[in-house]
Image (cartoon, rainbow, N blue to C red):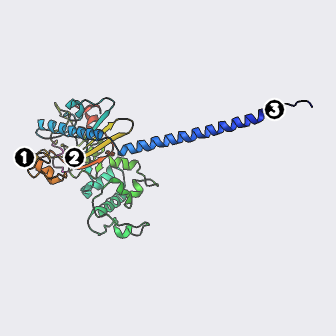
């Protein structure tokens, strides 16, 4: 019987294809596992920064505060604008950054906007009509609903809205009857939700413009040295002068140290910094560690303070960082807020830069 050779080619090919498919599947699974593991490690690293990273970041925050204080003392304890020399604490203090680390310190004047929670109704209406081009009726509805929201009572203004109106909504809620805590809170207000937010409840272009003009943090006068063009325009309309002439007559300094005669008498604006946000960003890899502090300069506090360091009292009692403790040691800043992994909103360039032809990169004069 003749010998017949059996061909195993097709079977071997099928086995090879199956092996390749299994290898491909395993490669995909391993790759996905590695990617997810890296993401988990990066996410965990955000909340488990090494002690030296956090310590160095807070040290740089202190460097920034010390720089601001030292420069202010040269001008009798007054802060006007970054051109005084406090915009770049790293170079000012000669800080050396460890190899492989990247550091950025941003100092923002949070007193460059008008305080919406204390703005009087006449100025609010003027802003809505002249700057945002709302008609007379819509402007009155907007101002009335806002004032009803932040005033302490439930008395409804003619064009306003109180809890009885908002309780009819689904879901129902009450008027805050307290100052705004954030500008996004405006989406809860009647009329405001339609004019300053889109159909999805997201801020629109009008909201961005409003954000460049008003603040829920600042409760004092707006510093015109760092205010936006829209703020200066509104103040000029209120005072009856030309905002383009506001910075005329400056001699040696590119900022105002006192209010021009044409603006005197307006309690809503000034020339000094009263609120600062300092943001320290430290990179050691792709994800930065960020610490942001909102501080109020308090350069006269040292007169009545004991000057002792925290924990240096005779009783050596633990310190908590309370306001009373800050006042006791004569710390030159009142720390209003400290947060990690968050930072302030981007700020608009001061209108002063355009008026004086100063570049945004100018930090000193």
Residue named by callout 1: 303
Residue drawn at the location 39% of the way across and 45% of the way down: 44
Give me the residue at 10% from left, 39% from top: 76
Q: Which residue is mark 2?
A: 295
Closest to the observer: 137 or 213? 213
Gap between marks 2 and 3 measured at Cα:
85 Å
Q: Is residue 345 above or below residue 11?
A: below
Callout 2 environment at 10 Å: few (<14), some (14 to 19), or many (20+)? Answer: many
Name the residue at 65% across, 36% down. 20
Residue 365 visible to an observer of this rendering: no
Residue designated by label 3: 7
Query: Which region is colored magenta?
Result: 260-267
Q: Judge whether 248 appears above or below 219 on screen.
A: above
Residue farthest toward the front in the current orientation of the protein:
1
Q: Secondary structure at mark 2?
A: strand
Give me the C-alpha separation between circle 1 and circle 3.
Answer: 101 Å
Q: Magenta stretch: residue 221 in it? A: no
Q: Residues within 10 Å of mark 3 (few under 14, many from 20)?
A: few
User: Picture coordinates of residue 60 (x, y %)?
Assistant: 24, 38
Residue at x-position 31% and y-position 39% = 281
Please report whichever mark, 2 or 1, sits nearer to the chain's N-terminal start.
Answer: 2
In front: mark 2 or mark 3?
3
* SS at mark 3 in the image: loop
| Residue 345 picture location, percent across and down | 33, 45
Using a 10 Å C-alpha cutoff, classify the residue at mark 1 as few (fewer than 14 neighbours), some (14 to 19) or many (20 or more).
few
Residue 144: give x, y in percent of width and height: 31, 62
């Amino acid at each position: 019987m003749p010998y017949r050779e059996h061909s195993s080619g097709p079977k071997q090919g099928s086995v090879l294809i199956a092996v390749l498919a299994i290898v491909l599947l395993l490669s995909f699974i391993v790759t996905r596992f590695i990617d997810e593991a890296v993401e988990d490690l990066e996410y965990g690293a955000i909340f488990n920064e090494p002690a030296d990273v956090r310590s160095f970041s807070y040290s740089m925050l202190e460097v920034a505060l010390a720089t601001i204080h030292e420069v202010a003392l040269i001008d009798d304890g007054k802060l006007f604008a970054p051109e005084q020399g406090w915009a770049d604490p790293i170079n000012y203090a000669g800080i050396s950054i460890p190899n492989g680390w990247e550091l950025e310190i941003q100092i923002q004047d949070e007193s460059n906007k008008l305080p919406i929670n204390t703005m009087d109704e006449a100025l609010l209406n003027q802003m809505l009509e002249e700057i945002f081009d709302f008609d007379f009726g819509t402007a009155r509805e907007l101002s009335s609903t806002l004032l009803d929201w932040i005033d302490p009572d439930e008395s409804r203004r003619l064009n306003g809205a109180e809890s009885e109106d908002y309780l009819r909504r689904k879901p129902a809620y009450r008027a805050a009857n307290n100052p705004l805590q954030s500008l996004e809170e405006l989406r809860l207000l009647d009329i405001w939700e339609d004019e300053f937010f889109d159909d999805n409840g997201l801020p629109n272009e009008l909201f961005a413009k409003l954000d460049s003009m008003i603040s829920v943090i600042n409760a004092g006068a707006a510093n015109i040295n760092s205010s936006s063009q829209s703020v200066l325009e509104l103040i000029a309309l209120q005072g009856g002068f030309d905002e383009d002439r506001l910075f005329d007559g400056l001699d040696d300094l590119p900022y105002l140290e006192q209010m021009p005669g044409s603006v005197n008498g307006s309690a809503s604006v000034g020339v000094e910094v009263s609120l600062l946000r300092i943001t320290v960003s430290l990179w050691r890899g792709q994800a930065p560690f960020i610490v942001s502090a909102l501080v109020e300069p308090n350069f006269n506090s040292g007169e009545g303070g004991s000057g002792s360091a925290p924990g240096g009292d005779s009783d050596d009692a633990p310190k908590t960082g309370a306001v009373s403790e800050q006042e006791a040691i004569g710390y030159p800043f009142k720390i209003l807020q400290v947060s990690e992994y968050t930072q302030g909103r981007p700020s608009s360039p001061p209108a002063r830069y355009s008026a004086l032809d100063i570049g945004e990169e100018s930090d000193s004069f």
